[in-house]
Image (cartoon, grey):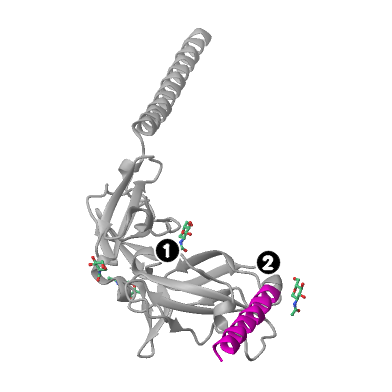
Amino acid sequence: MKFVKAQLFLAFCLYTGIITAADDEFVSRAENVRWVSLDFKTILTWMSKASNNTYTVQFSQVDESHWHDTQDCTQVSETECDLSNLLIPFNRTYQADIQTEPETMSNNADPHDFPHIYSPKFNPYRESNISAVTFTVETVDKNTVRVNITDPLTSIHQNGRQLSIRDILNKDLMYKISFYKSGNTGKRDIISDSSVAEVKNLDEGYSYCFMVAAYIPSRPKSTQQGAWSTQCCTKKDETFLPELSLGAWVGVVFILVTVLIIIITVTVLCCRCCQRRKILHTTQSSVAI
Ligand SMILES: *[C@@H]1O[C@H](CO)[C@@H](O)[C@H](O)[C@H]1NC(C)=O
Ligand SMILES: *[C@@H]1O[C@H](CO)[C@@H](O)[C@H](O)[C@H]1NC(C)=O
Ligand SMILES: *[C@@H]1O[C@H](CO)[C@@H](O)[C@H](O)[C@H]1NC(C)=O
Ligand SMILES: *[C@@H]1O[C@H](CO)[C@@H](O)[C@H](O)[C@H]1NC(C)=O
């Protein structure tokens, strides 16, 4: 009896061994597994040599090692998986597992025989990139400009509301505002912990240009700063005279003085001319008498 059991076991091992070898020929392990995440829309991507495989993604919190299934990424043929709404809470480190299966799977196939690969570790709260923001600038008084920043929206919905990055990052979200006086190369930076910031002590009458980027100092250096926005400038005050440079003022005065001199000279010459003619006229008439 013992002998028979051993033989059966051996036969079983050989059988599964053959199956595995056969599967390996056209089931190829996923490669190049990467996280791509922007404004908390987080997508796991990978590459594959075979075109006729399917993939099943599971994920787990690194310190828990309990694997969760993904409804939308089970036996799919795409080589990406959107995990934005699953990696919650955001401030945890996650790892995913991608298993490759043949397109046509036999019923008695053992999933443990299929090749799989772990993703790099990923923490959405600390590593999701932040896109360029939009903002407006508005002059408050002659030395102050208000910068009004729109927090980018995420793809996360909670209680029927689409969350912004402020809803997720709260107090950790700041903005870096970089600005310069138009025509000047020197840039200044300020950090604002609110989405509406007042930039004070600006020179009266000049145009200023602003650029904004999300800034999250609590993150690691490489992911602290979001993309820079396009620049937005205030209009210069056309009625403000000191806008003219000293050179321009000298020019204006010079032209005025020149015109004045010409007028005076012409007037003086004319008068002399008239006077001489008068004298000549009277002399001629006295000779005639
Ligand atoms: C964030 O952006 C940088 C630079 O574009 C890129 O190298 C990195 O892969 C991105 N990270 C994620 C998680 O998308
Ligand atoms: C899958 O494709 C590979 C080549 O890419 C081919 O050798 C194999 O026979 C295909 N398998 C199925 C089940 O179509
Ligand atoms: C995120 O997690 C890190 C480490 O677990 C912790 O130090 C940090 O305070 C957390 N941040 C927030 C906003 O919960
Ligand atoms: C900032 O802009 C938003 C709309 O873009 C507006 O609702 C809000 O009142 C503005 N805030 C300030 C302080 O101007």
Res 141 visible:
no
Mark 2 beta carbon near ligand 2 (under 8 Å):
yes
Q: Nearer the viewer, mark 1 or mark 2?
A: 2
Q: Is residue 73 visible?
A: yes
In the rendering, at what x and y percent does residue 225 appear?
36, 57
> Callout 2: helix, strand or loop?
loop
Is 81 part of what is drawn in magenta? no
* Residue 268 place in picture, x, y as percent: 41, 20
Relative vertical location of residue 135 with respect to residue 283 in this rendering, above or below: below
Q: Quadrant of ligand 4?
A: bottom left
First to last magenta residue range = 1-23
Residue name at image x 64 percent, y 91 percent: 107
Q: Which of the two labelled residues, at mark 1 and mark 2, occupies the earlier sequence position?
A: 2
Magenta: predominant secondary structure element? helix
Q: Secondary structure at mark 1?
A: loop
Could you classify mark 2 by the number of other residues whose Cα lies within 10 Å: few (under 14), some (14-19), or many (20 or more)?
Answer: few
- Per the image, the residue denoted by label 1 is 129
On the image, the x and y values in percent for residue 81 come to 53, 76
Three-letter code for the amino acid on which mark 2 is drawn: Lys
Three-letter amino acid code at the position of disc 1: Asn
Query: Which residue has dot 2 on it?
Result: 49
Which residue occupies the extreme top position in the image?
Answer: 287
